[in-house]
Amino acid sequence: MLTRIVTFLQDVRTEMRKVTWPTRAQTLQYTIVVIAISLGVAAFLGAWDYVFTQILNRFVL
């Protein structure tokens, strides 16, 4: 069992060395894109929520 764990950890280390990590600038750009898209989706859904709330308040309630 111990040899299997050691082998697994060695394989993980080998695979992690193969990973192409993004640069700091790329990470910052990707983070900004994710935040911008999240805010856009939140605004879109919030607007539709407001519209449907107004419709329900006006015609149903």
Image (spheres, rainbow, N blue to C red):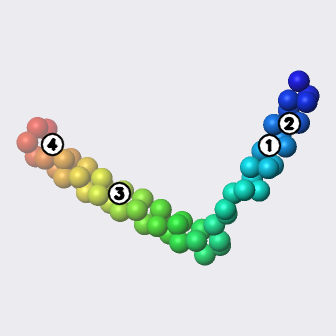
First reached walking from the N terminus: tag 3 or tag 4:
3
Q: What residue type is labelled 1?
A: Asp
Near mark 2 (Cα within 10 A), the count class, few <14, some 14-19 or many ≥20, is: few
Residue 21: image quadrant is bottom right
Between marks 2 and 1, how big is the CA–CA gap?
A: 6 Å
Q: How many marks?
A: 4
Q: Name the residue under label 3.
A: 41
Q: Find disc 4 in the rendering and name its residue.
A: 56
Q: Where is residue 9 in the image (x, y as percent from the top left)?
A: 83, 41
Residue at image x 40%, y 62%? Answer: 37
- Tell me which label, 4 or 1, sits earlier in the chain: 1
Element type at mark 3: helix
The type of residue carrying mark 2 is: Thr
Whether residues under marks 4 and 2 lie with C-beta atoms below 8 angstroms apart, the answer is no
What is the C-alpha distance between the residues marked 1 and 3? 40 Å
Q: Mark 2 points at which residue?
A: 7
Residue nearer the viewer, 35 or 15: 15
**49 and 22: which is toward the camera:** 22
Q: Where is residue 17 in the image (x, y as percent from the top left)?
A: 77, 56
Q: Which residue, given by chain and number where applicable, does mark 1 sit on?
A: 11
